[in-house]
Amino acid sequence: MIEDIDALRTRFRANLESIGLKSDQVVMLNQPGANVDEKKPWGIFLINPGAAEEQGFDTYVRVFQTGYVMLQIFVPNGQGSKVAYEIAEAFRKIWFKWRERSETGHILTKVGYPRQIANKDFMQVNVFVPYDSVRLMPL
């Protein structure tokens, strides 16, 4: 849902500096013309909303949705895994049990987890943070 994506993107942007990445070193998924300096740590941020389930009532529909936010972290080989895991932990902390409420519902994040990915050019760590969303939508 658009309201969820906006809230998640706003949360990420508001906390970007605290995770150790500069805004010009992060690619927002589907961002045309993104250009990062691959000699420094950089990342790809994405929001993946899952399938939605609806319950209909007389005047509104309640929509349940699960999904995840993810940051793919890339640190050039030779700079060590410590940098990648420090960024991963900082990203995970900004989402830890975060809740966004609005007039139409809420989003609640769950505990995130990092995973190292084999990559010959970079130390790559992906951090997944699942979320649940409930929205009320008028008919």
Image (spheres, rainbow, N blue to C red):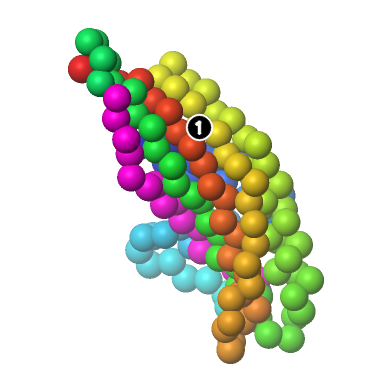
The x and y percentages for residue 3 are 39, 32
Mark 1: secondary structure: strand
Residue 116 in view (yes/no): yes
Quadrant where the C terminus is found in the figure: top left
Q: Which residue lies furthest to the bottom in this view?
A: 120
Q: Residue at x 54, y 29 (%)?
A: 100
Q: Which residue lies furthest to the top in this view?
A: 58
The x and y percentages for residue 69 are 51, 51
- Residue 52 shown in magenta: yes
The one nearer the camera, 37 or 113, is 113
- Main SS of the magenta part reads strand
Count neighbours of disc 1 (C-alpha within 10 A) and say few if under 14, some if 14 to 19, many if 20 or more.
many
The one nearer the camera, 92 or 60, is 60
- Residue 66 shown in magenta: no
Magenta segment boundaries in residue numbering: 40-55
Asked if residue 71 lies left or right of residue 29, the reply is: right
Asked if residue 111 lies left or right of residue 66, the reply is: right
Quadrant where the N terminus is found in the figure: top left
Asked if residue 38 lies left or right of residue 82, the reply is: left
User: In the displayed structure, would residue 3 be above or below residue 74?
Assistant: above
Q: Mark 1 points at which residue?
A: 107
Residue 13 in view (yes/no): no
The one nearer the camera, 56 or 106, is 56
Rendered image quadrant of residue 32: bottom left
Going by the numbered disc 1, the residue's amino acid type is: Ile
The x and y percentages for residue 117 are 59, 76
The x and y percentages for residue 78 are 74, 86
Q: Residue at x 38, y 32 (%)?
A: 64
The one nearer the camera, 2 or 118, is 118
Q: Which residue is drawn at 73% across and 66% down?
A: 85
Q: Which residue is drawn at 76% across and 62% down?
A: 86
